[in-house]
Image (spheres, rainbow, N blue to C red):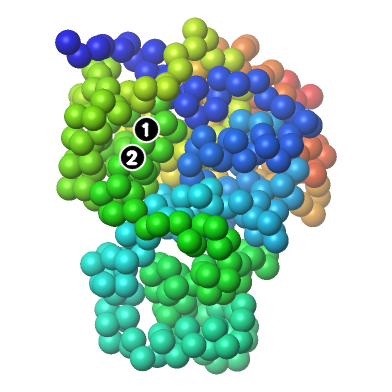
Amino acid sequence: MTRTLSAGQARRIALAAQGFADSRRDGDVARRHFTKLIGQLGVIQMDSVNVVSRTHYLPAFSRLGHYPRELLEAEAWGRKKSLFEYWGHEASLMPMAMQPLFRWRMEESRSGEAGWTGLVNFARERRDYIDGVLAEIEKRGPVTGGDFAEGPRGAPGWWEWSNGKRALEWLFWAGFITTKTRRGFERVYDLTERVIPRAVMEQPTPSPDEAQRALLMIAAGAMGVATEADLRDYFRMSVSATRARLAELVEDGALEPVEVKGWRQPAFLHPKARLPRRIEAQALLSPFDNLIWARDRTERLFGCRVRLEIYTPAHKREHGYYVLPFLQGDAITARVDLKADRQAGVLLVQSAHLEEHADVGEVAPALAEELRLMSGWLGLGDVSVAPRGDLAPALKAAVG
């Protein structure tokens, strides 16, 4: 008989799997805490938007509290890095040990079976050029995109999808090169075998089926309970591969099929999923946070529609440009459109909105506390609340 979970149980399982059932370690975050969290999540999405902070810094702050940003930089791009960059969910940081699990995707890119259509066509038509770029990297050592740009450096469009950029992007997707470090947000590339530790490179390459099963188990562990679509989206796998591998995992007893009240689709429960009695979380969530990046899943878990409005014309935005939902307990209770004014040293709350089910008297002081914490972590001073949104007056008073 299939087990049935309530919507509340599923939500608490999901929050625990994402690291929100554990107490924060504000000001006391060591490397082991950071690497444990990244291992638990399996992947951190990257994005260049820096209105508040680039998104890959935010998931650890949401879960661990005030941690040194240099910790992420050392693990991602330092000499003894424990993370590598690749296309996991989107452009992503992932634990180094997972690199062999993506070799099937790299091989599909090499053969033209996968990848962006434009890059696949470019590789088919200009392989001699790409091989020349690879030979240049092998001879020269670490390079940036600017080394292969066309036209004078800094000229309009000098680096926007030049042939050099296409070649580097294809080589990255195909696994011939990877990110050695970054300068600002610009990738510095080198040959994969000169970046990934030898111990990892020498690991046997799993078959595609084995790797996909492993990735689905990592996704299931990071979500606790999830539908087929949820699991497929976590590492952007195909429908056919996900369906086949899930059937194998269920048959092997690795995942338990369950029903969740209110969910239209059946779900799968990880065997090590925790079900806390309560969740005491208090966190601002990046719009690219693992917990909420799948919009349909977010609506199922929290009963609210969270949409990324960065690419929405300004006059059509409902909540703002860079909107961070506020997780309070096991509910999303508010949303704030934030901007770090680094020159003035102020964290700007450009709008603040209360969710329908939330109590303003409980939300405003807790959110004010979280905003002050974030401001300090970003190296800013005051928090300034603009008079936009139904929560703004109470939040402004709570910020003081």
Q: Residue at x 58, y 48 (%)?
A: 56
Return the residue at label 2. 216
Q: In this rendering, would 181 be left or right of 164?
A: right
Question: What is the distance, in whole Å, between disc 1 and disc 2 at their CAs?
Answer: 6 Å
Asked whether 7 or 204 is in front, the reply is 204
Whether residue 36 is situated above or below residue 128 in the rendered picture: above
Whether residue 336 is situated above or below residue 2 in the rendered picture: below
Asked whether 315 or 144 is in front, the reply is 144
Could you tell me residue 232's position as x and y percent?
A: 29, 42
Instruction: Pick out the residue farthest to the top.
Output: 277
What label sits on residue 220 in the rendered view? 1
Q: In this rendering, would 134 be left or right of 270?
A: right
Q: In this rendering, would 90 be left or right of 391?
A: left
Residue 329 visible in the displayed image: no
Quarter of the picture containing the C terminus is top right
Quarter of the picture containing the N terminus is top left
**Secondary structure of the residue carrying numbered label 2:** helix
Q: Residue at x 44, y 73 (%)?
A: 176
CB of mark 1 within 8 Å of CB of mark 2? yes
Callout 2 amino acid: Leu
Could you tell me residue 96's position as x and y percent?
A: 53, 52
**Secondary structure of the residue carrying numbered label 1:** helix
Q: What is the total number of numbered labels drawn onto the structure image? A: 2
Could you tell me residue 15's position as x and y percent?
A: 48, 24
Q: Residues within 10 Å of mark 1 (few under 14, many from 20)?
A: many
Whether residue 383 is situated above or below residue 120 in the rendered picture: above
What label sits on residue 280 in the rendered view? none
Asked which quadrant contains residue 31, the reply is top right
Callout 1 amino acid: Ala
Asked whether 78 or 162 is in front, the reply is 78
Q: Residue at x 38, y 69 (%)?
A: 174
Asked whether 343 or 34 is in front, the reply is 34
